[in-house]
Image: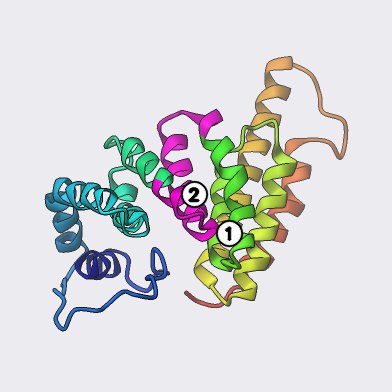
């Protein structure tokens, strides 16, 4: 576990830890250091099968709190190789988290699983999981976990729910500000910009394909200008990461 966390830190330096260690965790006297992202990701890739066996052994020993952490600690490799059949691993981890009756654990797993499912095109399943994750994180007082879940939810929501996506991003930015986490604030803002850009593009295409004129003050450009200005002001307000 300690080596996996060390690899995670090397792969994504400065990021939030994948999870909080359980109270009975004992840090080994020596832990392998990784000198680069490539080395850390290579270790995760080489050890993936062995980590699955360790998680399975933890389940046999009735230690679900260890099993779900082993799965989630691999998140840097999940991000880099998202289409490498991670759903079964994370679905097993979700069962482990629920066996712990721990909303913190369940929220963390649901967020990562929801993102993977969304990337696989299984949007309805992803959204179903991601709607639950922020509530569980809030129940566990996991501020950054809730913010991350909300950003992930906003990214997965279908285009016909722009209001829900905007609400999720706004709440995520507020939570990230509360936690003084500029990186998560930027993720939330970027998602807002992506949503606004997509909406503007759809408006322009709709107008073009309908072959009609847009009433003054209602065109894509006129709507986009104040939105763009608002986002620029928000970006300038962020502290450097």
Q: Residue furthest right?
A: 216
Query: Which residue: 58% across, 65% down?
Result: 185
State how many labels appear. 2
Quadrant showing the N terminus: bottom left
Stretch in magenta: 96-125
Q: Secondary structure at mark 2?
A: helix
Whether residues under marks 2 and 1 lie with C-beta atoms below 8 angstroms apart, the answer is yes
Q: What residue does disc 2 label?
A: 111
Tell me, yes or no, whether the highlighted magenta stretch contains residue 95.
no
Compared to 130, does 175 lie above or below? below
Residue occupying the far top of the picture: 210
Please tell me in which quadrant of the rendered image residue 221 appears. Answer: top right
Please identify the dominant SS of the magenta region. Answer: helix
Residue under pointer 1: 137
Q: Where is residue 55 drawn, in percent x and y?
A: 25, 51
Residue 228 at x, y percent in the picture: 68, 54
**What's the image's color scheme?**
rainbow
Q: Which mark sits nearer the N-terminus, 2 or 1?
A: 2
Q: For mark 1, does the 10 Å Cα neighbourhood hold few (<14), some (14 to 19), or many (20 or more) residues?
A: many
């Amino acid at each position: 576990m300690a080596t996996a966390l060390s690899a995670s830190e090397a792969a994504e330096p400065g990021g939030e830890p994948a999870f909080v260690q359980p109270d009975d965790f004992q840090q080994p006297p020596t832990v392998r250091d990784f000198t680069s992202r490539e080395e850390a990701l290579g270790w995760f890739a080489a050890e993936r099968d062995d980590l699955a066996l360790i998680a399975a052994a933890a389940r046999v020993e009735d230690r679900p709190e260890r099993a779900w952490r082993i799965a989630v600690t691999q998140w840097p490799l999940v991000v880099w190789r998202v289409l490498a059949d991670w759903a079964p691993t994370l679905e097993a981890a979700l069962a482990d988290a629920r066996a712990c009756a721990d909303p913190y654990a369940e929220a963390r797993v649901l967020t990562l699983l929801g993102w993977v499912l969304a990337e696989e095109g299984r949007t309805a399943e992803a959204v179903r999981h991601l709607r639950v994750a922020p509530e569980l994180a809030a129940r566990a007082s996991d501020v950054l976990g809730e913010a991350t879940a909300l950003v992930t939810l906003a990214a997965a929501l279908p285009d016909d729910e722009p209001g829900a996506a905007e609400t999720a991003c706004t709440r995520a930015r507020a939570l990230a500000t509360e936690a003084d986490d500029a990186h998560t604030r930027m993720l939330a803002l970027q998602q807002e910009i992506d949503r606004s850009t997509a909406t503007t593009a759809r408006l322009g295409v709709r107008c073009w394909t309908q072959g009609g004129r847009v009433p003054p003050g209602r065109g894509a450009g006129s709507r986009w200008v104040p939105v763009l200005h608002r986002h620029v002001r928000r970006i300038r307000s962020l502290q450097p990461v």
